[in-house]
Image: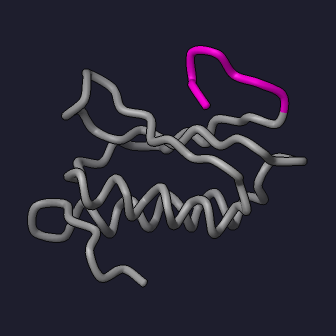
Amino acid sequence: MSRTRPVSGCRELAFHDGYVVDDSGEVALEDYAREMTRAREVEVVRTGGERGPVTGVHLCGLDAEPAAAVRADVEDFARELATRSGGGGLGWS
């Protein structure tokens, strides 16, 4: 999967804001988004490079756009990760 070469069934879930999360937070957000949307593959979207804020997730393997409630839940999780000390994601499940 690559955001630069999207395929059928890929969608962008853009957040209303950007959230600073560390590497473990990024993994947790991808796992959470995968579970919530039932996407086959998920990649976080950052602005400003590898350490920039997470502004959404790229989802692949979907039949339809995720419901508004699911989209909001994924962004809420990103926001929660960002408020933790260091933006870490260990222990989310």
Name the magenta segment's main secondary structure. Answer: loop
Question: In the rendering, at what x and y percent does residue 81 appear?
Answer: 29, 65
Question: In the rendering, at what x and y percent does residue 49 appear?
Answer: 25, 23
For the rendered model, the colour scheme is one colour
Q: Is residue 3 magenta?
A: yes
Comparing 47 with 27, the one in front is: 27
Q: Is residue 81 magenta?
A: no
Q: Residue furthest left?
A: 85
**Which quadrant of the rendered structure holds the C terminus?**
bottom left
Residue under the point 24% across and 29% down: 50
In which quarter of the view is residue 34 placed? Answer: bottom right
Q: Is residue 76 left or right of residue 8?
A: left
In which quarter of the view is residue 92 placed? Answer: bottom left
- Rendered position, 45 above or below 37: above
- Rendered position, 46 above or below 79: above
Q: Is residue 89 left or right of residue 58?
A: left
Residue under the point 65% across and 68% down: 36
Circle count: 0
Q: Residue furthest top?
A: 4
Residue under the point 36% across and 32% down: 46
- Rendered position, 65 above or below 30: above
Comparing 75 with 34, the one in front is: 34
* Magenta part of the chain: 1-8
Question: In the rendering, at what x and y percent does residue 62 appear?
Answer: 81, 47
Q: Is residue 83 left or right of residue 70?
A: left
Question: In the rendering, at what x and y percent does residue 53 appear?
Answer: 27, 38
**Which quadrant of the rendered structure holds the N terminus?**
top right
